[in-house]
């Protein structure tokens, strides 16, 4: 089976705002073959920059776009998915966003092979089992505790059993304000639902502040506190872990390569790793 087209497709809301709401636009990737099979994938960051990686003119032998590397190639098996990944990353060695942008094509290729072989992609990747997932609502904190309470209550009324609140004004004032935001979220969703907080890197490199906030937030029973520190502060995450924060710490969504994820795994010592296939080069583990 041959790859006949690789189409990056940009989707956006009618207007884009400065809110830290990552669902305002995205880039889908569609791969089609000469046997009529179509696969879909996505790259979840800066979609128009990523789109350029699919079609930018060649600069030299290490800057060849993804479409050029894939169109006309053979795709029949999991080995082909891995072979093509190595080819694309080699051809695009000096394209700084190549790993991230390739996420969409890699996911789409697993989709293509799964459809061709009539098997789920997780099996082809070597996974033994699927696990049930609990979907959660992911929203921004309101500008005030009162507004946050209303958002939380609205989600509860819609039946969500897990919710994540993040970004917005968290970290912009003092400890009492941060606590009031988390408290209002917990009160809004009730005692039963799972509550997560995405700090949106608001405490930078300040481990002490994260330890203090974690202690305060523990009484609201957080399932996790996400990205309290800057993504580059990998060593500080390790320090945080050694000092045993009062709530589980999650991070890693900013990993754009497998190597970076490996560094997080070894040095940041997180309770939860949040590396995403749509960011770090797709679903292929290498
Ligand atoms: Mg996050």
Image: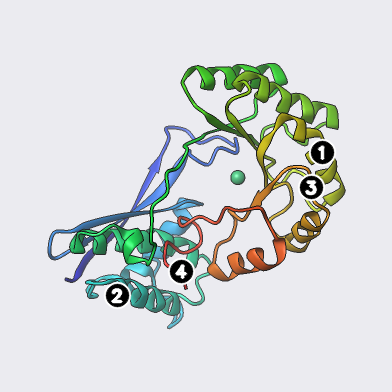
Marks 1 and 2, the one that precedes in the sequence:
2
| Residue 209, percent from left and from top | 85, 44
In the picture, the quarter occupied by the N terminus is bottom left
Between the C-alphas of marks 3 and 1, the distance is 7 Å
| Residue 250, percent from left and from top | 65, 49
In the image, residue 205 sits, relative to residue 218, either above or below, namely below
Between the C-alphas of marks 1 and 2, the distance is 49 Å
Between the C-alphas of marks 2 and 4, the distance is 14 Å
- Can you identify the residue that label 4 sits on? 285
| Residue 169, percent from left and from top | 72, 31
- Can you identify the residue that label 2 sits on? 80
Task: Confirm or deny contact between disc 3 and disc 1 (CB under 8 A).
Answer: yes
- Can you identify the residue that label 1 sits on? 215
Marks 3 and 4, the one that precedes in the sequence:
3
- Asked where in the image residue 282 lies, by quadrant, the reply is bottom left
For this orientation, the residue located farthest to the left is 35
- Can you identify the residue that label 3 sits on? 245
- Asked where in the image residue 237 lies, by quadrant, the reply is bottom right
């Amino acid at each position: 089976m041959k790859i006949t087209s690789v189409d990056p497709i940009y989707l956006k809301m009618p207007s884009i705002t400065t809110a830290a709401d990552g669902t305002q636009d995205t880039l889908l990737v569609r791969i089609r073959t000469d046997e009529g099979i179509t696969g879909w994938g996505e790259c979840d960051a800066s979609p128009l920059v990523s789109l350029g990686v699919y079609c930018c003119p060649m600069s030299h032998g290490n800057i060849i776009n993804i479409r050029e590397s894939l169109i006309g190639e053979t795709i029949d098996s999991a080995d082909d998915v891995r072979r093509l990944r190595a080819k694309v990353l080699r051809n695009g060695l000096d394209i700084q966003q190549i790993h991230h942008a390739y996420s969409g094509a890699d996911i789409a290729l697993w989709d293509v092979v799964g459809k061709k072989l009539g098997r789920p992609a997780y099996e082809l990747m070597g996974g033994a089992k699927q696990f049930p997932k609990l979907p959660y609502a992911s929203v921004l904190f309101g500008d005030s505790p009162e507004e946050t309470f209303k958002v939380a209550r609205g989600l509860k009324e819609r039946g969500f059993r897990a919710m994540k609140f993040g970004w917005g004004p968290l970290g912009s004032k003092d400890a009492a304000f941060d606590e009031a935001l988390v408290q209002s979220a917990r009160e809004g969703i009730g005692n039963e639902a799972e509550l997560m907080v995405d700090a949106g890197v608001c405490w930078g490199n300040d481990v002490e502040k994260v330890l203090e906030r974690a202690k305060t937030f523990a009484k609201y029973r957080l399932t996790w506190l996400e990205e309290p520190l800057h993504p580059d502060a990998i060593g500080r995450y390790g320090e945080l872990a050694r000092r045993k924060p009062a709530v589980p710490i999650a991070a890693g969504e900013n990993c754009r390569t497998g190597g970076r994820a490996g560094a997080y795994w070894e040095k940041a010592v997180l309770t939860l790793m949040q590396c995403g296939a749509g960011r770090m080069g797709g679903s292929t583990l290498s």
